[in-house]
Amino acid sequence: MVKKIVIAVVCLAATGLCAQNGTVSPYSFFGIGDPRSFGTVENQMMGSLGVYGDSIHINLQNPAAYSKLKVSLNDGVGLAVYAAGISNRQVEIESFTESARSATTNLDYLSLGFGLGNGLGVGFGIAPYSSVGYNLLTESNDGSVLNLFTGEGGLNRVYLSVGYELFENFSIGATSNFNFGKLESQRVQSIQDVQFGTRDERTSRVNGLDFNFAAYYTPKVNDKHRLFVSARVNTQANLTSENTRRLGSFLSSIDQEIEAFDVDLAAEGLLRTDLKIPATTTMGVGYGEDKKWFLGAEYSFQQFGDFSNEFLDVENVGYSDASSISFGGFIVPDYDAFNGYLKRVTYRAGVRYDKTGLVVSDRDINNFGITFGVGLPLGRGQYSNLNLGFELGRRGTTANDLVEESYLKINIGFSFNDLWFQKRKIN
């Protein structure tokens, strides 16, 4: 049954993931769009910590944790973990003078992981990397000139991860990400009492690689408690952008195109541009009791001030070094309780603060979020579960004519464990 569900999700994802509009944020106007969280619901609900891993869940953020995936329930039996997540994000966008509401629903990840024995685990899947979705209207001081900016698209990633336990409780891992997608933007300008308007359409087809390397140490401190330490480096993403630009005029009264032509970007050196997303380093530490409770913290930093997008250069926008700090954990009252389903539920919570590195009109655009959720076991004695999560947060500011986003994100994640091999036995 699990395999049938996974096949159905794969078929839907093949047509739906690349077509989804993953954001309605004005801040997706900048860079390569709004960065998406790369993590399962389980990890996101602990403040997006990647320092915790176990034998029955996929950890997308920490490839070294694949070494922990369960290989056997008994001799000759192996398990595979199928994971998928969807989210609904409801946003209230508020400026100094007005506000608006919107919402999006998206598939967040589709993943498969399994252990191969001898401390080796692998995984692969697909997930969104960034999303573009905005509709902005600006006008001159006297109201005579209107500019309408719209954008859509985004980047997706397919990945392959490998984790290996070098020696007891110490693992290393690596993930290779191939990022690809299309970014589309348009500016329409109209002038009062002028019958013709102008249209500027730009498209970027982007692709490129980055890698995530991790080291993971999880020693026993005593008979009950375990220490978790991880270090991860997501290398610089070297992306190539194939660009096109089309300029035209239209009749404002009926929005009818009059003439249009393709800009010779080769002459400007913008036909093919490079986008370099700076490397991110993450350090994490945690402490807990297996199958009982866990508390952890992580800190990430990125020299994002080195980023630029020549083709989509925007005035009053800059970039600075980015950082993120997260705290979170979980508790399971009694994972093996015979009576009382709620005792076997995993309760998760966390908090995070992100300095995004985006600077608009001399204001840092930062994000603060509070996360919480539950992991619901599916059946007695099974390792599969349904994960529900919630995130309340705020990003941006209304100062300097900017906007502040207040959001509620609802996450649903599925983590199914199923047999992927069983050694035949002859009596």
Image (tube, helix red, strand yellow):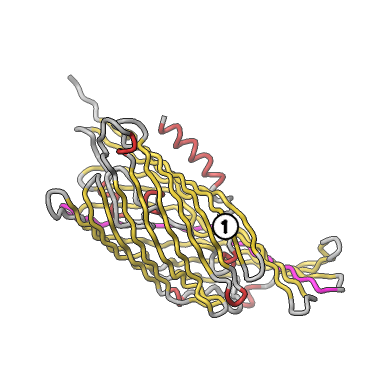
Left/right placement of residue 139 relative to residue 234 reads: right
Q: Quadrant of residue 211?
A: bottom left
Which residue is more in the foreground, 366 or 38?
366
Left/right placement of residue 6 relative to residue 97 reads: left
Seen as rendered, the residue at the extreme left is: 223
In this view, 208 is above or below 10: below
Which residue is found at the position 87% from the left and 73% from the top? 193
In this view, 290 is above or below 381: below
Instruction: Please state the horizontal and vertical placement of residue 383, each as a whole percent of the image.
Output: 31, 37
Which residue is found at the position 39% from the left and 69% from the top? 279
Task: Answer yes or no: is residue 106 visible.
Answer: yes
Instruction: Please state the horizontal and vertical placement of residue 161, each as a whole percent of the image.
Output: 34, 52
Left/right placement of residue 356 relative to residue 168 reads: right
Which residue is more in the foreground, 74 or 248?
74
Q: Quadrant of residue 117?
A: top left
Q: Quadrant of the N terminus?
A: top left
Instruction: Please state the horizontal and vertical placement of residue 8, each as a whole percent of the image.
Output: 49, 36
In this view, 339 is above or below 131: above
Magenta stretch contains residue 173: yes
Over which residues does the magenta segment extend? 166-192
Seen as rendered, the residue at the extreme top is: 427
Instruction: Please state the horizontal and vertical placement of residue 100, each as a whole percent of the image.
Output: 64, 60
- The residue that disc 1 covers is 91
By secondary structure, the bulk of the magenta-drawn segment is best described as: strand
